[in-house]
Amino acid sequence: MHALKSVAGAAGLGMIGFYLGLGFVAVLRAMLGYPDAWGGEINIVGGYVFGLVGWLMGIGMWGIWIREWFGLKTYQRRAPGWQRYFTFNTDHKVIGIQYLVTFIVVFLLAGLLALGMRLELASSGMQFISHSQYNGAMGLHGILMIAVAVAAVIGGAGNYAVPLMIGADDMAFPRLNALTFWLIPPVAVALLATPFLGGIETGWTAYPPLSTTTNSSQILFDLAIITFGLTSILGGLNFIITIIFMRAPGMTWGRLPIFVWSMFVTSWLAIFFTQGFAVALLMILLDRVAGMAFFSAEAGGDPLLYQHVFWFYSHPAVYIMVLPGFGLALEVISHFSRKPLFAYRYAVGAFLGILGLSGVVWAHHMFTSGMPNYLHGPFLVATELISIPTGLIFLSALGTIWMGKLWLQTPMLFAMAVIFNFACGGVTGIFLADVPTDIHLHDTYFVVAHFHYTIVGGEIFALFAGIYYWFPKMTGRMYNETLAKLHFWWMFIGFNLTFFTMHLPGVKGMNRRVADFPESLDNLNMLVSISGWLLGLSFLVFMYNMINAWIRGPVAEANPWRARTLEWQTTSPPPHENFPEQPVIKGHPYDYGVPGSVHGVFPNSGLAGAPSGSAGGGGQ
């Protein structure tokens, strides 16, 4: 239990740092003659910064990293078994599981908030909570789910699988990798503390002028998301350097697994665009605590400026969320179709095309904002253009499935659901890219349905495909396949019942982010709410299956799927440095059906990866 005591100690240091920061700013304010030294929101900023530093030093950053800056000997806390997940551990596999478990918990918390919202929206009128409480629940649900969408696949599956798939022993910067995870708990604490300061009234978008005048929960929101953005930028940098410089000999760019390609492109998106959201919230913060007027019209500012800066990040952020999901789905589909990935080079080109186009479509979120009309056409065209590389990804998936020897295990079911769900989201996206239609549908539940089809239907379904696919690798155990398929069908049906139906009140003009609606929409909203609760209950099956399998599931083979990529050519779970020796890449990761082809070999041990003709299990 030493590791848990260390976490408690770090939390204590964080709390001490928070109060020291509050006091430090209060003393400065008193010295500068402010009448209420303890009453400013800037005190919260000082407390957060000092508390964040105290937390990081206490969790292990001081011993493993900062001591080196002062010429002192570094040390790392060693913890056995499960306790290592509560330490500042630099092993990418530990960090990947830390991310996955953390964001599954966050996902479930955000889901509970959604169920509460749907309970209130089951019928018109206010039943259980007030308008302000609904706003707070909606805002917290939104930002928690955005955090899950941004970090769960990238931080969890990406951290765990990418070094294994490219034949590396770890990430390029292991300590930086650990730092990116341990910045997350203070973000979660700050967001979960917002209800105690009045709740997030602005939704996750934090538009001014409301965000510059609302309660002090906005300060915690701003600080948390700026910190979260830092983890995204640092993580993206780490992935880029790792993929460029740490690939195994023989792993050319043309032999890179498609999931690794998706992570590489996503990392560039994170580096290019994440600072947009951080800058927008920093300007909100400065308006509130430093008397600036970026968004105050009467003082010469412009509230519309915020939307441009915000969406310049937040539309590319959609692809930061979705591209790793696409890569994961294509990865699984190829292995479970026992075919080479169809149009591999075109799929890679599609990822790069999305990288290029994603930064020039942000203002399609602003067709009703009052921006100049002459900008509508160019942004409409640019938005339609980005459907071309997305279509190439669909082509790759469908071409791989076509005439394949499909093995319909749970990972494959979730991967194919990604393609179906995102196709639905893509079709509705065409309506929202069209200016006249968007003007009618803007800020309605049609947009909510579209967004959930793209992010939940695309990326979150891919996340579950990845969890089921790599669970044997991570734990050395197998889950119950019957329960896993029950979870899939229950979740798939519940999801589509919920969000397909949600388009209908949107077409009828039902506003999103509002706690009430006309009585004429009662029947539709009751159906959406019942379907939403059905969807929520499906995760009980998932949680039981995963926890039970991790504790007492049957021992898994090293390569239960008979896949060709490198992560399946080592033990389950892998050793500390992943492989007994550095692998050498001899062939393509998806050359199924090519006689004698192997992906990777271990020259000194005489071991080779799974041959191209491996069938991969019963029922094939």
Image (cartoon, rainbow, N blue to C red):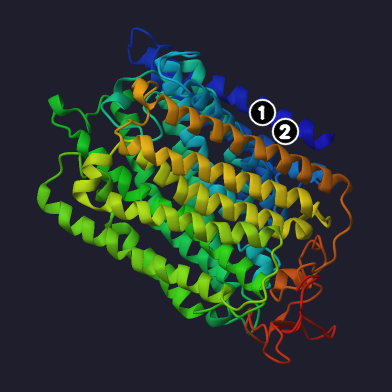
The image quadrant of residue 562 is bottom right
Image coords of residue 108 (percent x, y): 62, 35
Q: Which residue is mark 2?
A: 7
The reply to whether the C-beta atoms of the residues labelled 2 and 1 are less than 8 Å apart is: yes
Residue 590 falls left or right of residue 144: right
Coordinates of residue 381 in the picture (x, y in percent): 22, 61
Q: From this viewpoint, which residue is outermost toward the top?
A: 35
Of the pair 424 and 567, the residue shown nearer to us: 424
In this view, which residue lies farthest toward the bottom? 595
Q: Is residue 174 visible?
A: no
Residue 607 versus residue 324 in the image, above or below: below
Q: Decide if residue 572 is in sight here.
A: yes
User: In the image, residue 560 lies at what x, y percent?
Assistant: 80, 67
**620 or 536: nearer the eye?**
620
Circle 1: element type: helix
Q: Which of the 4 quarters of the picture holds residue 19?
A: top right
The quadrant holding residue 387 is bottom left
Of 564 and 528, the residue lying toward us:
528
Secondary structure beneath label 2: helix
Q: How far apart in space, not on screen, are marks 2 and 1 (Cα)?
A: 6 Å
Q: Specify few, some or many for label 1: CA neighbours under 10 Å numbering under 14, 14-19, or 20 or more.
A: many
* Percent position of residue 249, x then y: 65, 82
**Vertical placement of residue 120 versus 97, above or below:** above
Which residue is at a point 64% across and 84% down the rendered structure image? 591
Q: Which mark is residue 11?
A: 1
Q: Observer-nearest residue: 358 or 460? A: 460
Write the residue at 64% across / 44% down: 490
The amino acid type found where label 2 is placed reads Val
The type of residue carrying mark 1 is Ala
Task: Residue at 32%, 26% (x, y): give it.
Answer: 211
